[in-house]
Image: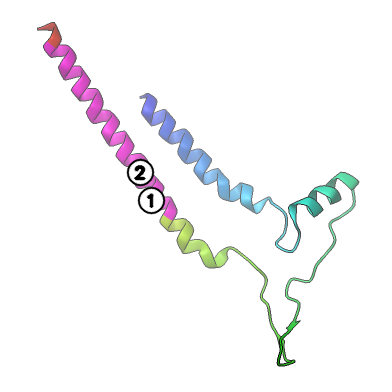
Amino acid sequence: MRPVRIALIALALFFAAPAAARAQAPAGETATEAAAATQAGAPAAETPAAAPTSTSSGLPTYTPPRTLRAYAHVFVAFAIAWVLLFGYLVFIARKFRRVEEQVAALSRA
């Protein structure tokens, strides 16, 4: 029962990580700026999400805002990998417990 509890706690922490990541500072703001703004009580300075930048050819290029939406498939892949890992650990723990019970039964006999 103990490995199951550990696995459930680990899964809860794993799935709580995306919520904590969303609560972090916006993409255009560094962590120190966000901390300074919250300590000072002032709202964080607004930065343009997609400011045009110039290139060597003189033409402006569009820089899209940085989001994590493009990496959803990576998150899903890692989530599946972690679930499989924890499932394997539970499987091994149960098998080990059975072996220990068999050894204890043989030592009693």
In the figure, 28 relative to 64: above or below?
A: above
Quarter of image, res 96: top left
Please tell me which residue lies in front, 55 or 34. Answer: 55
Dominant secondary structure of the magenta stretch?
A: helix
Number of callouts: 2
Residue 108 relative to residue 82: left or right: left
Quarter of image, res 49: bottom right
x, y percentage for residue 23? 68, 50
Residue at the disc numbered 2:
85
Mark 1, secondary structure of its residue: helix
Residue 98 in the magenta stretch? The answer is yes
Q: Please give the range of residues in magenta.
A: 78-106
Q: Amino acid at mark 1?
A: Ala
Residue at the far top in the pictured view: 108
x, y percentage for residue 27? 70, 62
Residue at the disc numbered 1:
81
Residue at the far left in the pictured view: 109
Q: Are marks 1 and 2 in contact (CB under 8 Å)?
A: yes
Residue 60 relative to residue 106: left or right: right
x, y percentage for residue 85? 35, 44
